[in-house]
Amino acid sequence: MTGRRTGGTTGAVRLTVGYIPLADAAALIVAADRGFAAGEGLALELVREVSWSNVRDKLNIGLFDAAHLLAPLAIASSLGVGHVRVPLAVPFNLALNGNAITVSPTLWNALADTADGDLASPAVSARALARVTAQRRARGQPPLTFGMTFPFSHHNYQLRFWMAAGGVVPDDDVQLVVLPPPYMAESLGNGHVDGFCVGAPWNSTAVDLGIGRILHFGAEIMARAAEKGLAVRRDWAAEHPDTVTRLVRALESAARFVADPANHEEVAALVAAPARLAVEPGLIRRTLDGRLRLASDGGTRASDRYLVIGRLGASRPEPVQAAWAYAQMVRWGQVDLSPELLAAATDVFRPDLYEAAVGTAERLPAGEPADNVGAFAGPAFDPADIAGHLAGSTQR
Amino acid sequence: LPSAPADAALKILVIDKDPIRRAILDAGLREAGFSNIILQGETAGLLNQIYRIDPDVVLIDLENPSRDVLEQMFQVSRVVRRPIAMFVDQSDRETTQAAVEAGVSAYIVDGLKKERVKGILELCISRFNAVARLQDELDRAKTALEERKTIDRAKGILMQAKDLTEEQAYALLRKTAMNEKRKIAEVAQAVITASELLK
């Protein structure tokens, strides 16, 4: 199913690409639906999926040529952690950031009652969470439960990083459960979880229903998190260099289009369309603009870092970002620490393929955090010394 | 561990929202000699259900978003008493592919020999494919029925408006469809739409 040429006069290369209906698939959707792929001689058939497990498996066995994938999952698959080992390559980073942590109004009030400052600061909210979990333990109440989307995801790692910075031990003091994004709001509403970390537009969905308050944007936990990559099998990339180049070029043009605020209305309509995310376009518009309502009766918070597509050097896959994700996997006991595994993890992100397609890119725009991560707590990230970095992070 | 249980005693949990497919899988597994089968349609609190049921094999359809919930079990082994591992690996590439294409995924408890459950997965694949074919036939039958209803309504409209017999009305629809290279049902739908507009 690879590199097939369609019959007829167009001669376009047909590619089947899996995705999960999330706002951070915008560059892929725009590439397919607004002519950028066709301009590179590609016909993209986007296939909407219901689980990351499905996307991974269908990419692994060749039902998909490429996929919108959680960046940490691309690394896990390449290392053979938690599943069959299939080496993947990420030649294009579809988005930085885009997640948010949302909590129930009850938990928000409990945090506000114990906060030693402004809850808008993740350091303050994490310390407040530590106090609330300690109180619950002292009263014999069950631990708080938080939802996230997959074991190998920045949703999982951002929640854990934030909690640990306040002194919470995620595996002992709270319960972390995997929930499919469409079930997040419902689970918060019926008390199955007390909070969650998920991508757009699901935080806003909970806010609009009046059952959740956005506590933090993921970008407040770390300034640059490689959230979703365009993943292909590594052997497929080696066998189809021309197709990879065209795909990267189409995505680069699409991502730049998404980045321009003048196009947000049109992009929101394309992404929200019934055949894609099938949501209200205004929801996507707010996501692209980085202006989110925090609570049904509260104000809004704006940040141009909320979801970063096609700007601030977001599209170039940065191996240091893969090293950061690998460090989180090590920190939380998903994988061992070894130079070989680190090398295998960083090899997943392929700036060489990206630059072969679009030319040499600026590595890190001025004003961006020097370690390319910008976490709100702990030492600056050094991929050459992950053991030292983890020892310096708050960890019990 | 005590000595391996007889295959008939394997506890098999089937998670599928489709009640028909659930029933067909159940029947198939029982026919094949398995008797310890638990059927689940609901996926609320899935992990807790699995801890409670403590299955040897879990089968889940790929249309189910809760499949990601199962994947967590490989990670947090201290939460689960019996870590569950994906049944299929590199050595079973063909079976894996067939399963994913059919739309089913299987998980087994760690340590269970996969040869013992290979038959279960193969049975699932064939039943899933059979259900898909059945669904396809059903869809086609439904469409045919809908089309016949549409054509009957259009015939009625034409008979009344142009004072035609039923045969003449049908011949007119057929001739128009041929001339315009369209399906009779499409022309019939156009007649119905036009008559609604002209009301």
Image: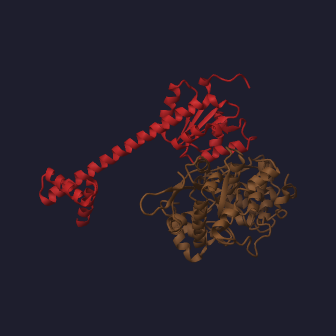
Q: Nearer the viewer, residue A71 or B109?
A: A71
Q: Is residue B133 above or below residue A36?
A: above
Q: Nearer the viewer, residue A148 or A48?
A: A48
Q: Position of residue A319 (x, y in %)?
A: 74, 61
Q: Is residue A229 visible?
A: yes
Q: Position of residue A231 (x, y in %)?
A: 63, 56
Q: Position of residue A7 (x, y in %)?
A: 43, 57
The residue under the point 31% across, 47% down is B144
> Outermost residue, bottom direction?
A262
Across the whole image, how many numbered discs are drawn on residues?
A: 0
Horizontal side of residue B145 vs A81, given as left or right? left
Q: Colour of chain B?
A: red
The residue under the point 72% across, 44% down is B75
Q: Colour of chain A?
A: brown
User: In terms of image quadrants, where is residue A23?
Assistant: bottom right
Q: Is residue B11 visible?
A: no
Q: Report the colour scheme.
A: by chain
The residue under the point 65% across, 63% down is A92
Q: Nearer the viewer, residue A35 or A18?
A: A35
Horizontal side of residue B79 vs A252, given as left or right? right
Horizontal side of residue B8 vs A168, given as left or right? left
Horizontal side of residue A131 vs B39, given as left or right? right
Q: Is residue A88 above or below residue B83?
A: below
Q: Nearer the viewer, residue B164 or A138?
A: B164
Q: Position of residue B105 (x, y in %)?
A: 58, 40
